[in-house]
Image (cartoon, grey):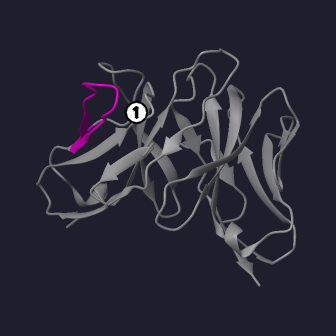
Amino acid sequence: NAGVTQTPKFHILKTGQSMTLQCAQDMNHGYMSWYRQDPGMGLRLIYYSAAAGTTDKEVPNGYNVSRLNTEDFPLRLVSAAPSQTSVYLCASSAPLVLVSSYNEQFFGPGTRLTVL
Amino acid sequence: GESVGLHLPTLSVQEGDNSIINCAYSNSASDYFIWYKQESGKGPQFIIDIRSNMDKRQGQRVTVLLNKTVKHLSLQIAATQPGDSAVYFCAENLANQAGTALIFGKGTTLSVSS
């Protein structure tokens, strides 16, 4: 298994441009999430999806996602702003089977995005 | 805002020493706490987790302690090695979130010198 893969690894955008960050997993995980990581801030949840066809946002404005199938969870920046400069991490985990359990999240290597 | 935080942004130790990384949380509704390790240029990797009904859990060279009274979580690494150098994050999983939405602390950078 490749696990969680993300493309591209690096990208530079100009303010106002749009872009889609790709995330894919081959572990048949139901849950997928997007985080952004900024220096000194830890990881902050942007969006998550519990299953194909569903999404739930944590942070509105500037981001959009789709979950058309189990494997892919692309994150779209509609009109990029410098405040969106960050490292974007995608994660997946298996659906919760037991209420008392926790399923480990597997992270991709990240996309480092700079908005000028 | 974030409810999970770490006491120190950096920690420097000598190879062979034991390392203790601390974390404070504020959400009593969290049912799982997780420690992640992130090496440069990589995504976070799971180290160990602990359920809220436990006080201690041990793994290979790592121990996590949970003190619910003071809402404190710690990660102990025995016989620290240069390969342990990384950023360590604690995270909490809110009950009913099914492990899909973690709240992360700001991270502690562990530097191990030989």
Q: Position of residue A102 (x, y in %)?
A: 65, 27
| Chain letter of disc 1 in the image | A
Left or right: residue B94 compared with residue A71: right
Q: Position of residue A101 (x, y in %)?
A: 68, 22
**Residue at screen point 70% across, 67% down:** B84
Determine whether A107 is above or below A68 in the image.
below
Left or right: residue B60 compared with residue B47: right
In magenta, the rendered stretch is A61-76
Q: Nearer the viewer, residue B67 or A113?
A: A113
Determine whether B51 is above or below A6 in the image.
above
Q: Amino acid at mark 1?
A: Glu
For residue B54: magenta? no
Q: Position of residue B1 (x, y in %)?
A: 52, 42
State the residue position of label 1: A58
Q: Secondary structure at mark 1?
A: loop
**Residue at screen point 45% across, 55% down:** A37
Left or right: residue A102 compared with residue B40: right
**Residue at screen point 59% across, 15% down:** A97
Q: Nearer the viewer, residue B43 or A56?
A: B43
